[in-house]
Amino acid sequence: MSPLRLALAPAPEPAALEASAHGLGARLEAELDALLTLSPTGFAITVIVVLALAWALARLGPLALRTAWRLGIDPRHRLAILGSFARLAGLLLGIAGCLRPILSRAPTLGGLLALLTAALIAAAAPTLLRNLGAGLGLMTRARLREGDLVEVGDIQGTVLDVGLLRVSLRSAGGGVTHVPAADFDRLPVIVGSRRAAAPIEIQAEVDHGLDDAELERLRRALWCSPFRRAGTEPSVRVDASGTRLELSLDTWAPQAGVEIEQHLRALVGHSARREQDPPPPSQLIEEVRA
């Protein structure tokens, strides 16, 4: 219908408006009666199952992706977008699964309640919505990936995790900083190359030549080092005699070079003493600090 016809169309009769309002009221009343027949136990079980599935999808998807990265699959982290989609799918599954039992019985009333709830959340927690919107933007655009060097405002670190509401960064001192996702839209952000890791190299000597099993044990210990930067490969080189080693490790903590060198020498010492398993990282850090 053209705008001219709409302007010249006669106004609806009051009786028609009253009938329409009466019909809407009757529909809402019928939907409310349908909701009252909903079994609380069945609804609670449905919500619990849906939330459990959504949580598993949002957690296990990124976990499987990080495990694949640790195994050397996708070394450039091009599949990082899949982890973001898994989290987003978990969020949508949780919302849709919880609303489906209500909307299937009361679509009009359920829609009104959903809009009212969204308005209340927007009024009560605007920061939460801003972080959620910024987090969704970061995840879907794959702007940040695990292992990236990031500087946001006065905060610097290596990306550990990109979540829906915040981004976790590993600082140079070894701590973890959780930055609200909205800060990546509000503050200037500098993203460095994941290849720009700071290498730490040492030379060490052992009393006896290390056999293949001991060298492999040393490489595994370097791979599991808490100072190794994600997505990088440690290096172990041995001279002809087998008693002189050259170790190289790309680290996320270039400011702690002396501590990391002591940590690497401690790993060499444990491997040279023919221990079956390398000590846990916490024990090594305590030895270094002592």
Image: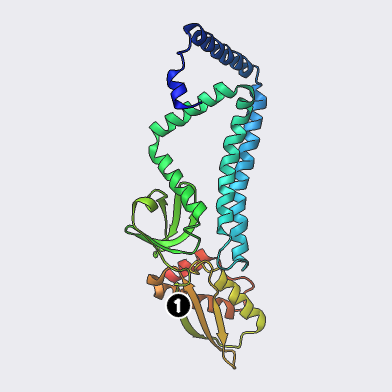
Q: Position of residue 76 (x, y in %)?
A: 55, 67
Q: Residue at x 58, y 16 (%)?
A: 32
Q: Horizontal placement of 179 versus 16: left or right?
A: left
- Asked whether the viewer can see residue 41, the reply is yes
Q: Which residue is mark 1?
A: 200
- The residue lying at 67 percent from left, 26 percent from top is 42
Figure check: 229 above or below 269: above
Mark 1 lies on a secondary structure that is: strand
Say which quarter of the image contains residue 274. Answer: bottom right
Task: Using the image as rendered, state which of residue 51 and residue 30 is in the foreground.
Answer: 30
- Furthest-bottom residue in view? 240
Please state which of residues 199 and 283 is positioned toward the viewer in this rendering: 199
| Residue most extreme to the top | 15
Q: Which quadrant is the C terminus positioned in?
A: bottom left
Coloring scheme used: rainbow
- Asked where in the image residue 257 lies, by quadrant, the reply is bottom left
Image side of residue 109 versus residue 126, left or right: right
